[in-house]
Amino acid sequence: RPRPRPRAPPRPPPPRSTVMVEGHGVHRVAQAHRRALVGKKFKASSPNGRFVDGARAIDDKALARVEAIGKNLFYFFDRGEGGRGGGSERHGHHVMHVHFGMSGRFSVHAASDPPAATPTTRLKLEGHGRVAMLSAMVVDLMDESGFEAKRVALGQDPLREDACADTLWEKFTASRKSVGLALMDQSMFAGVGNIYRAEILFKAGVHPEQPCRDLDRGAFDSLWRHSVELLQRGYSTGSILTVDPEEALVLGEPWTRRYVYNQSSCGRCGGKVLTWEMANRTVYCCGGSCQKLIESRSSVANPSSGAGAKKRAAAKKVVREHVPFVSHCAPDSGATAASDPSKMTVKALREILAAGSDSEKAVVSASAKKPELVAAVAALLRAAKKEEEDGTSTVARSTPTKNTNTEMRVKVVVAKTSESPRTPTPGTRGLAMRSEADAVRDKANAGEKRNVEHVALEDDASRAVVRGERERVVAAKGGKKRGRAGKALAPVTPEARATRPRRTK
């Protein structure tokens, strides 16, 4: 009898796309509620019956303050009978802890026309002409000691003024995790989610599997700087926009909003974007020259994650071949960068060309990418050098020629851009916050679907924009709703999923 052929091993499942509210979105909710709710008392109820005791405790109690740490919100309600902050010194606070999870939302509406509560609505606040409704994975009540315990357990939040990079550095260097896992560890980088992880690692030029212990302080500072910059930008704009504006003009679509997250290729080097599973989340990485995995000083990348992770990390390790790039961790001197345009930034190259004559500006198009800009500046430098060797240009000349001006422009721009970038001060103090309605319009104009980035903040204005956008899409399809398009904007929680009727065969 012929021996049965062995079955082929099952194919691994494709990377899963799970979108959670990231830190900038949580801080936007906190700021909006400081403006709309703090200092007021509300009638509290629990429409789905899952926060009855908590609602009873905070009913008709003044909301004293709102705190955001990473992906967590804390609402402090007075225990006493006073007004704004009244009685808090004697009685302390009830602290409502909120974690949105994958699909929560905390919306505030005018009492004249509020949306109906849903099976996922755990808390409803009514009063002062407003109705607020909360749907979240975690909603629980604690005292202030519980809040302090949570605060200590959470890591450094780039959007809090009390964030300390030195404290995080100590924990980072002691970790046996990979950098990709560390960025998602809320006890280290509080508020960073999967989209920001991909983009922060890309901008810092760090491979997700690189062990934390391999990074020096300069590389760590680059990670922290990009964390602060990108989350602050997200807080201000209401969108996860990680591509720097000047580079977005050069790269063009589809790299005007994000570099590698959900991209098929890298806009900078043209390499394929690679994905794999890391602690049940999809990690993104440029497979070209932007995020090389350097030979580790540690024996393994992550011993605590089992043999599979060791094999995966070992398989991905490669010997780094030198590719000239702009290093923020160890910036080149001005003289070195001036002699090699490939080590200049795109912005610096464009400044050099823009300051030249009309013929020099016409060398490259407005959409030219870095290789073309490098070639154009290199040609100008070669022409300047040839003119000097031919004796037509001297240092003593009182009237500089066009080509000596080119060299001067290069040196001025390089001197300005080769300085070590400064890390912005963590926190949101002094930052303007764009309205949620404007943020929704921006995403719609960019053609970005609402399932790319989950948003927990909603008000009447943003709700109207969403409704208008939905009607526009339906009209474009000839007035026909296809599939579940009409329901795509509603958050899908485990509770909502449980209420759906089961299909029968």
Image: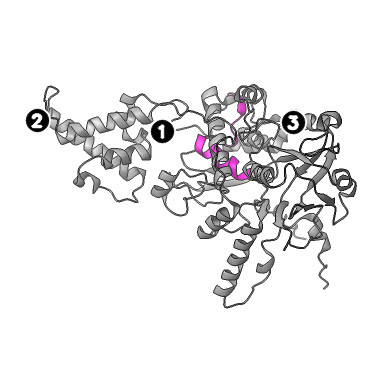
Q: How many numbered circles does the render carry?
A: 3
Q: Position of residue 346 (x, y in %)?
A: 37, 40
The answer to whether residue 119 is seen in the rendering is: yes
Kindly identify the amino acid type of the residue bearing the numbered disc 2. Thr
Q: Position of residue 503 (x, y in %)?
A: 81, 70
- Characterize the local packing of mark 3: few (<14), some (14-19) or many (20 or more) Cα atoms within 10 angstroms: some
The answer to whether residue 75 is seen in the rendering is: no
Q: Which residue is labeled 3 in the image? A: 151
Furthest toward the left, the residue is 391
- Characterize the local packing of mark 2: few (<14), some (14-19) or many (20 or more) Cα atoms within 10 angstroms: few
What's drawn in magenta, residue-wise? 194-213
Which residue: 70% across, 30% down? Answer: 303
Kindly identify the amino acid type of the residue bearing the numbered disc 3. Arg
Q: Which residue is labeled 1 in the image? A: 326
Which residue: 64% across, 30% down? Answer: 301
Quadrant in the picture for the C terminus = bottom right
> Which badge, 1 or 3, is on the more N-terminal residue?
3
Nearest the camera: 213 or 98? 98
Q: Quadrant of residue 421?
A: top left
> Which badge, 3 or 2, is on the more N-terminal residue?
3
> Which badge, 1 or 2, is on the more N-terminal residue?
1
Q: Is residue 96 magenta?
A: no
Q: Quadrant of residue 280?
A: top right
